Image (cartoon, rainbow, N blue to C red):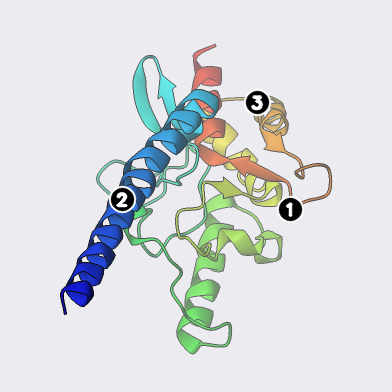
Amino acid sequence: MNTSVHGAVRLVWASLRALLVLTVVTGIIYPLAVTGIAQAAFNNEANGSMVTVQGKEVGSSLIGQSWNLKDTDKPDPKWFQPRPSHSGYDPLTTGSSQLGASDPTLLKAVRAAKKQVATFNDVPESAVPKDAVTGSASAIDPHISPEYAKIQVKRVAKANGLPETQVKKLLKEHTEGRAAGFLGNPYVNVLELNIALKKLGKD
């Protein structure tokens, strides 16, 4: 009997020691090590890839945001516009609308958005690319396709009183190619492009 109790105590004590060691290793040492490495090697990414202009944080290069007229839900013609977002670019409510490609609600919304984008940018509906009227899987994608950016050049240039050639050049400078030359698709970061556009207007 005493032997059984002694064996049980030893087993419990061994389990508690294992629990303590694993808690320290996986709950304290490992997180601190990963955080330290991230801060040392990838400081910008680890801190949200925040973009600063004149000492003020204006957003993250990883999270899309709206570029509407102040206190309205209407897009501001002075800025390049991002992909639509059913969540309002809220990083706390990421995710797609979950509507299937053949869902009547989605089809109706896409048709309406296509007409709106075409009218806003004064281009035919056939020129409107799909990312201009459909949200991304996360609903906060900060990038748009070069095709979507190109149909906005004329409108942006006119609204800012700038030559189209200057805005086209700016867009070309902010168009990123495929990763490693073959992965993914070319893209444009809307926030970074609009910041450069604002600086261009001051020159």
Tell me where residue 193 appears, x and y as whole percent.
57, 32
Q: Mark 2 points at which residue?
A: 23
Q: Can residue 10 be seen in this view?
A: yes
Between residue 31 and residue 8, name the one nearer to us. Answer: 8
Tell me where residue 86 appears, x and y as whole percent.
39, 65
Quick check: 174 above or below 124? above
Between residue 108 and residue 38, name the one nearer to us. Answer: 38
What type is the residue that disc 3 sits on? Pro
Is the residue marked by circle 2 packed among few (<14), some (14-19), or many (20+) residues within 10 Å? few
Question: Which of the 4 quarters of the picture holds residue 31?
Answer: top left
Q: In percent of the image, x 73 and y 32: which residue is there? A: 172
Q: Name the residue under label 1.
A: 184
Question: For residue 163, which numbered disc appears in the image?
Answer: 3
Residue sitting farthest toward the right: 181
Q: In percent of the image, x 42 and y 20: which residue is there? A: 53
Is the residue marked by circle 3 packed among few (<14), some (14-19), or many (20+) residues within 10 Å? few
Residue 109 appears left or right of 32: right
Is the residue marked by circle 1 packed among few (<14), some (14-19), or many (20+) residues within 10 Å? few
N-term-proximal mark, 1 vs 3: 3
